[in-house]
Image (cartoon, rainbow, N blue to C red):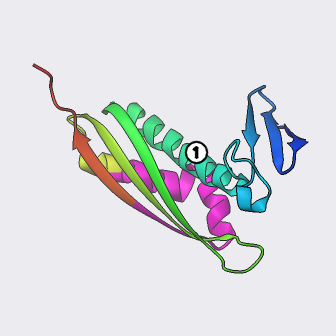
Amino acid sequence: MKARVRWHEEVAFVAESGSGHALVVDGSPDHGGRNLGPRPMELILMGLGSCASFDVVTILKKQRQQVSGCECALEAKRADTVPAVFTEVVMHFTVSGQGLDHAKVERAVSLSAEKYCSASKMFEEAGVALSHRVTVSEDVAHA
């Protein structure tokens, strides 16, 4: 896996993945940025949620669950000192679909956290307290 990050201006950068996708990363105005894109630490948090969600959806599809939506809302706390690393992250998964088995959804989230999600493992190994909440919602049939 490769990536490249190029300085654009002030504290804005263009980050490009090895697969050819690019986005602008910028600092907040109080740090000299112009708010052109997400902050670097926001990207890390977004990566964690994306990695875990990928696992959850993949596991549920393999279990033939009728998933129509999966959202992972993350809330992180950071250290008060520099470096302001993450100290705690709460991940709240909301999974929707028809006839979902609540136990299978809970298990998919657990498997992601404990076994499959590379990002979760890196966070845990760095000493970040990770916790998960799950909400399962039934799709409403439209008349």
Q: Position of residue 111 (x, y in %)?
A: 47, 52
Which of 92 and 10 lies nearest the eye of the viewer?
10
Q: Position of residue 99 (x, y in %)?
A: 20, 35
Q: Residue at x 39, y 51 (%)?
A: 93
Q: Which contiguous range is marked in magenta?
A: 106-132
Crowd class of label 1 (few under 14; some 14 to 19; many from 20; radius 10 Å): some
Instruction: Give above or below for 86 relative to 73.
Output: below
Could you tell whether 44 is left or right of 75 in the image?
right
Q: Position of residue 10 (x, y in %)?
A: 86, 49
The amino acid type of the residue labelled 1 equals Cys
Magenta segment, principal secondary structure?
Answer: helix
Quadrant for the C terminus in the image? top left
Q: Is residue 103 visible?
A: yes
Q: Residue furthest left?
A: 143
Instruction: Give above or below for 107 relative to 83.
Output: above
- Element type at mark 1: helix
Could you tell whether 66 is left or right of 85 in the image?
left
Quadrant for the N terminus in the image? top right
Q: Residue furthest top?
A: 143
Q: Residue at x 74, y 53 (%)?
A: 27
Could you tell whether 28 is left or right of 5 in the image?
left
Q: Residue at x 77, y 61 (%)?
A: 31
Instruction: Give above or below for 112 relative to 127.
Output: above
Read off the residue under disc 1: 51
Could you tell whether 122 is left or right of 61 in the image?
right
Q: How many marks?
A: 1
Q: Is residue 63 visible?
A: no
Q: Residue at x 34, y 55 (%)?
A: 134
Is residue 15 covered in magenta?
A: no
Which of 103 and 21 lies nearest the eye of the viewer?
21
